[in-house]
Amino acid sequence: MPGLSSVIGFKALALSILAVTAHSSPSPLNKKQQCPNHPAGRLETASLPALCPLPGHIGILPDEPANVVSWDFPPKCLSPPPLTKEEKEALAKKEAEELKTKGGPEYLPSKDTSPRIDCLFTSTNFRNGHGISLIAKSTIASNLLSLGSMQDGPLFSVYAQNRELKGKPYKIAPVEGKGLGVVATRKIKRGEIIMTDYPALLIGTGFLANTKPHIGRRMLKQAIKQLPEGTRRKVEGLQRGQERFEVEAILGPNSNTVSIGEEPGERVHVGLFAEAARINHGCRPNAHSRFSERRLTLEIMSHVAIEPGEEIVMSYVPITTPRDERRAYLKSHWHFTCTCPLCQGTPETIDESELFRRRQKDLKETIEDARKNGFYQDAINMSRDWLQFAEWDSVPPLEAEFHDSLADLYFRNEDQRNATRYARMAYDGWVRFGSVDDEKLEAAREFLDRVERVNEEVRERTGSV
């Protein structure tokens, strides 16, 4: 399964090992025991009253119905053990040296002395019974609840109904030489949302980095065990990697990284999307993904039109990665040699694609530099060149996103006519796209309103109609 910007193997995420202690194993809560207000709760102890604090104790929004989520199991938490005598002495020595260097305690940076607490949370009713297990700092769970990321609400109900009426445009089926894959069952238009998937597991990289492997594996096995049966079967049925332990063999080839929250050092999480994990790699992908942090949703959309019976593939590495590096990375991380049509193409085809991708990468970087330095017309001209190379390589951007960018550049360049034109095109594009996350649509509407206000001011100032 590809990452959104880069894919990190599960074993590589265990960067450092620190001692931890495990609290008691979870057991199901009955409905009367569930926390009515803030189910993330205070997690310093495993006693139920501490898990059900009064409103406001952990920064959650007031307990309105739209912000209530029930965890189906009491959180299973890990916290670091007390410092040893040697560790305390080393810390005191370091602080003494800092005092001597800086000149006094007022010069020392403030330190967060609160212990790190990583917990397993499971909700079986998340996304209409899909379910989710989250392993991360307790503050991450609190923030997700406060932002409403865990809530289904009417938006998801309407979205699910619309998707159900249209039906899935794909099926999971055997693909020659690859095992199972995702195959189109009807013609898929360019820029269409093919698949919408939700995380079965979300795992903080801080947890992986600060937890002994055998304890981490126990927590991960419990996270899978607590999922609803249908989702659990999907996870357990995924293709296994070559890792020694079962849970690592499942996560290794099937997980990808997503960003959640704003807490420094805690943004990156490993996500396991059991449906999207079935999509195989292709060096010339016909689909790509977008993750919504606000909705905890992964959407797979088409780069180009896809015909019935055609396999849906995504690139497991950034498409601008040179061919030799790309193939070496796939071999070392996923243990396969890519035999996609591009890799097996003629030398002329491969060289042409490499040229297009180098130009895309160079142009994109130069466009951003031009934008930052105020050379807006140059950025506009290069954007058109970049789009042409992307089209030639059959990996064009999402149309609404490209129009968003052009509208912004024209507006900065004080070209109101083209700014208005592309702002309207971007807004219309996001409406047609129909994402479950309406953040981009809202932003496009606000930008269009802003452009129209400037147009109105110009008309009033000049007296034009």
Image (cartoon, grey):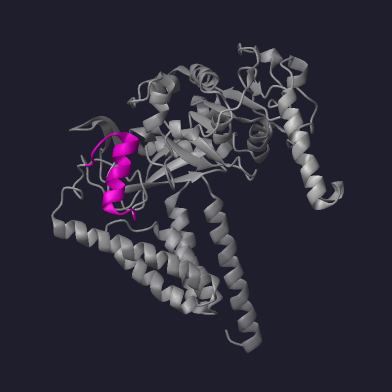
Residue 211 is drawn in which quadrant?
top right
Residue 393 vs 306, above or below: the answer is below
Q: What span is colored magenta in the figure?
A: 320-338
Q: Residue at x 37, y 62 (%)?
A: 361
Q: Is residue 285 visible?
A: no
Q: Closest to the observer: 464 or 206?
A: 206
Q: Residue at x 34, y 56 (%)?
A: 320
Residue 121 is drawn in which quadrant?
top right
Q: Residue at x 40, y 34 (%)?
A: 164
Q: Position of residue 110 (x, y in %)?
A: 79, 44
Q: State the count of labels.
A: 0
Q: Position of residue 46 (x, y in %)?
A: 71, 16
Residue 331 drawn in magenta: yes
Position of the N terminus by quadrant: top left
Q: Main secondary structure of the magenta part?
A: helix
In the image, taking residue 361 as reference, residue 304 lies left or right, namely: left
Q: Closest to the observer: 103 or 150?
A: 103
Q: Position of residue 321 (x, y in %)?
A: 33, 53
Q: Closest to the observer: 363 or 82?
A: 82
Residue 298 drawn in magenta: no
Residue 174 vs 195, above or below: the answer is above
Position of the C terminus by quadrant: bottom right
In the image, taking residue 432 as reference, residue 352 lies left or right, namely: left
Q: Position of residue 408 (x, y in %)?
A: 52, 69
Q: Residue at x 66, y 38 (%)?
A: 143
